[in-house]
Amino acid sequence: KAGVTQTPRYLIKTRGQQVTLSCSPISGHRSVSWYQQTPGQGLQFLFEYFSETQRNKGNFPGRFSGRQFSNSRSEMNVSTLELGDSALYLCASSLNSGVEKLFFGSGTQLSVL
Amino acid sequence: GESVGLHLPTLSVQEGDNSIINCAYSNSASDYFIWYKQESGKGPQFIIDIRSNMDKRQGQRVTVLLNKTVKHLSLQIAATQPGDSAVYFCAEKGPPDYKLSFGAGTTVTVRA
């Protein structure tokens, strides 16, 4: 069974641009969560999607948004990029919403110049 | 998350010795706890989990201990191997928002 797949693996953007990251969950998993990982802040929860609906949201500004498609694949978008958005963005899937065991992808490393 | 008093950001262990990684969590109402291992260039990988109605759970070479009285969680790795070198995260889940909240992580280095 394939794991969680995130694309692209690396991304370089400049301030003010926007970016879209993609995540394909494990087959059969219907919940997708997104986390931001930085050396200073650790893993910070962004949001969770289940059945194309946002179920939970972390404390991030409205520039961070996401969506989930009917096949459970998810995308997250960051608009008007800032230098501080440089981070590893991790996607995790689980069978259903509320199932605690998350399976993580390898992440997308975003660098904002 | 993890409190500064109990959390060591780094741990150096001799190969073959046992490792103990500590984590102090913040929410006394948390009812689920989980440990992840993250190797360089990879996402976190599940190690073991435990619910609040238990105080100990064992896996393959790993044991998680939960002390709810002092809100402390530990991960014990038996006979530490070079492949155990990684960053280890504890995470908790509970009310009000039931999202998995991660600690700062402990970097474990295994000496040959």
Image: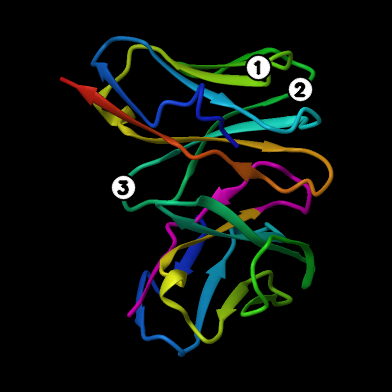
Q: Nearer the viewer, residue B99 or B60?
A: B99
Magenta stretch containing residue A108, yes or no?
yes
Task: Work out whether A39 lies above or below A81.
Answer: above
Could you tell me residue B92's position as x and y percent?
67, 36
Q: Quadrant of the C terminus of chain A?
A: bottom left
Magenta stretch containing residue B5, yes or no?
no
Q: Nearer the viewer, residue A32 or A88?
A: A88
Could you tell me residue B38's position as x and y percent?
41, 42
Please tell me in which quadrant of the rendered image residue B90 appears: top right
Residue B66: image tag? 1
Q: Residue furthest left?
A: B112
Could you tell me residue B81's position as x and y percent?
28, 21
Q: Nearer the viewer, residue B82 or B6?
A: B6
Residue B52: image tag? 2
Contact, mark 2 vs mark 1 (Cβ under 8 Å): yes
Give the Cα separation between the discs numbered 3 and 1.
Answer: 27 Å
Q: Label 3: few (<14), some or many (≥20) within 10 Å?
A: few
| Sooner in the amino-acid sequence: mark 2 or mark 3 | 3
Q: What residue lies at 25% left-to-right and 24% top-to-bottom?
A: B110
Q: Label 2: few (<14), some or many (≥20) within 10 Å?
A: some
Q: What residue lies at 68% left-to-right and 63% top-to-bottom?
A: A47
Q: What residue lies at 62% left-to-right and 19% top-to-bottom?
A: B72
The residue stretch that appears in magenta: A94-113
Residue B40: image tag? 3
